[in-house]
Amino acid sequence: MKDSMTGWIGGIALAFALAGPAAASPIAWVQMVAGGAEARLVTPAPACPAILVDGAARPMRQRAGPSETYPNRVCAAALPAGVRRVVVEGVALPIPKAHPRRLVILGDSGCRLAGLVVQHCNDPGGWPFAHIAVLAAAKRPDLVIHVGDYYYRETPCPTGDAACAGSPYGDRWATWQAEVFDPAAPLLAAAPWVFARGNHESCQRGAPGWFRLLDADPKPRTCPAQSDTFAVDIAGARLFIVDSNDTNDFAAPQMLVAPFAARLNGVGGGHGGGVAWIVTHRPIWNALRVGDLLTDGVVNATERAAVRGRNLANVQLVLSGHVHNFTSLSFGQARPPQLIVGTGGDLLDLNDSPPPATGAPTVDGLTARTFTMGRFGYFVFDRQGGDWVGRFHDLSDSVAAICRLHGRDLSCRAPTRP
């Protein structure tokens, strides 16, 4: 029997109270980068430690040293294909699989502190990312895909507001630890991750922390800078992680369209004819919900202009976040489907309250079979034969949507209740 909402909120709150600061344990994880997997470690030690790879000690290189806002160093080590055991500072890290078959997908997970917009960061009922991470880790994924937007605590908690009192803010280590590494700890321990850059990690917001901690490039970049496109193989497809932080939702000037189009070079028909997925924070297509009415939600004019006329014949799926709901759009064979999973913990879009809405609006000139709902949770995608079958889990861990990706057809529906 599932715990009640009150039960899990109380349990998570008690865990937070008992755990205290999480800095006592090493903060280490495995992420996918160009060419394979990489172990990373955040440590206050005066030098990077050795890492044990299948029992053999190897040096970790320093990725970034201490600074005024980051009083620690970031260490990294490439992991060889076929590795069986990785241990750093006494912590066993998750092992990358050659062809991951179970994916956990989520995004837009931080706690929003932005002037007058104040999320209840100290209340698991108001900011449920830690609870989502526990539930998702229990599904034993082979790979976690975060579609971007980690850094939301941009301004201080208002004086006297107990719901966020004491919260760190600004692009510094304490903030990133509170936004990502503390709440996501069980899920970071469960599987390697793919990190996509969101617009909250732009050079006007959280880029320094992004480049220092999570970007796939071997060395942290300094703004103005973009993240390079890189590829990750999964069962039956290749993910292309494409930076869209600098695109514009409402305008398509050539100065933005051309750089994003260049980051798509090699995707689709250009990588040898295999099946490709595009993983990029801002969705190319979206449907706007007003009550039960669905219409074209023009959510990124720059990306639409960049893909117009481009050969996307081998692209099976576009996977994104940015819009804080769960949405699928399927266009038949004319265009790859779009899946949006912006449900990891930040405030949901107000017009997407339950129940789900379905319809067939015209989106960027084509009919889009659409399913959309606003609900916190995470998505599990399993490879089954030649298809991918997915289930969206809400905060009670109930299945709120069932999806199937067959070729380029993505169909999602609410489960049938007895």
Image: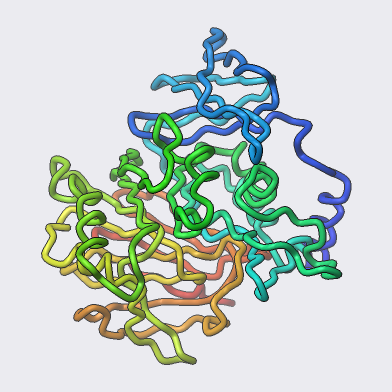
Left or right, residue 409 beside residue 182: left
- Quadrant for residue 252, please give it: bottom left
- At horizontal 18% and vertical 48% (from top left) the residue drawn is 265
- At horizontal 56% and vertical 66% (from top left) the residue drawn is 399
Question: Is there any visible trace of residue 293 in the rendered image?
Answer: yes
Residue 35, percent across and down? 33, 29
- Quadrant for residue 270, please give it: top left
Q: Nearer the viewer, residue 201 or 277?
A: 201
Quarter of the picture holding the N terminus: bottom right
Quarter of the picture holding the C terminus: bottom right
Residue 119, percent across and down? 69, 69
Q: Nearer the viewer, residue 256 or 376?
A: 256
- At horizontal 45% and vertical 59% (from top left) the residue drawn is 199
Residue sticking out furthest to the front: 68
- At horizontal 41% and vertical 76% (from top left) the residue drawn is 371
Residue 299, percent across and down? 36, 74
Residue 125, percent across and down? 74, 67
Colour scheme in the image? Answer: rainbow
- Quadrant for residue 337, please give it: bottom left
Left or right, residue 237 beside residue 270: right
